[in-house]
Image: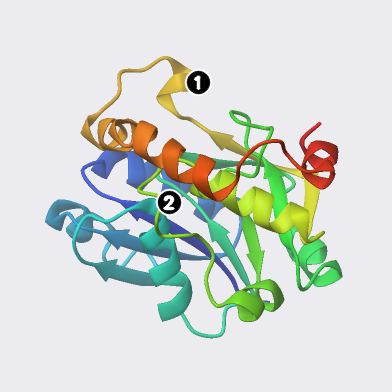
Amino acid sequence: MKIVLAIPTGGRVEKIRKVIEKWRKACDFEIAIYTWDNETKKAVDGKVDYLFEGELQSFAKNQNLMAEKIKNWDVFICGADDLFPESGIGHIETICRNNPDKVIWAKDGFLNKQPTHAIITRGWYNKYGYIFDEQFRHNFCDTDLFIRTANKSELVKCFQVAFDHRHPFKTGKKLDDIYKIGTASYAEDRRKFNTKHPLPLSKEIKEVYV
């Protein structure tokens, strides 16, 4: 089974080196990088299986692009340059084989009330042809995916698999320029989300959310 970990990154050379090292030690997944930064490109070139470069785009667009460009993957993990493996990584293949047309919700150790770094199966992806709604700049694209999949019983919660999402809101470290770009679009992304998904939440979402 071909499992790909996809990571958009730029301006965080030491961080992405550490993330790649940790994942290489934890598993034999293929690693894909999308970067808009020449220094990052030089640092990871030859150390990953796929390397894409282009302009700084949204998380949603970066992940959709990699999912489209990489051929013949069976499982696609929406990773990040602050996402580390923690436990149960070896179970991902079995879980996805047992749920070949679902989205898998792993524990991320930060925002555990929704799948912030979803595991996408090929069967589910082929049904829709994309992962994230690209109208969201950064925030709420994962929440939108959560609602879309939960409403259709396409989401499988599996905290047997755990990531370590070392976001500054968890670690207490200072926000760098990339994090600031993400937080700057919060209000607009929330407006778009509320327009697309007006309250109240459906029964299905409440059941998964709790």
Horizontal side of 37 relative to 66 (left or right) equals left
Q: Residue at x 49, y 49 (%)?
A: 141
* For discs 1 and 2, the disc positioned in front in the rendered view: 1
In the image, residue 65 sits, relative to residue 20, either above or below, namely: below
| Residue that numbered label 2 is attached to | 20
- Tell me where residue 64 sits by quadrant: bottom left
Where in the figure is residue 108, as x and y percent of width and height? 62, 37
Q: Rate crowding at label 2 as few (under 14), some (14 to 19) or many (20 or more) other CA atoms within 10 Å.
A: many
Q: Residue at x 66, y 79 (%)?
A: 127
Where in the figure is residue 67, as x and y percent of width and height? 48, 72
In the image, residue 71 sits, relative to residue 74, either above or below, namely: below
Q: Residue at x 71, y 58 (%)?
A: 149
Where in the figure is residue 178, as x and y percent of width and height? 26, 37
User: Residue 170's mark?
Assistant: 1
Horizontal side of 209 relative to 42 (left or right) equals right
In primary-sequence order, the first of circles 1 and 2 is 2
Where in the figure is residue 69, as x and y percent of width and height? 41, 79
108 and 141: which is toward the camera: 141
> Label 1 amino acid?
Lys
Q: Rate crowding at label 1 as few (under 14), some (14 to 19) or many (20 or more) other CA atoms within 10 Å.
A: few
- Tell me where residue 49 sits by quadrant: bottom left
Q: Secondary structure at mark 1?
A: helix
Q: Residue furthest top?
A: 172
The reply to whether residue 167 is visible in this rendering is yes
Q: Residue at x 64, y 58 (%)?
A: 119
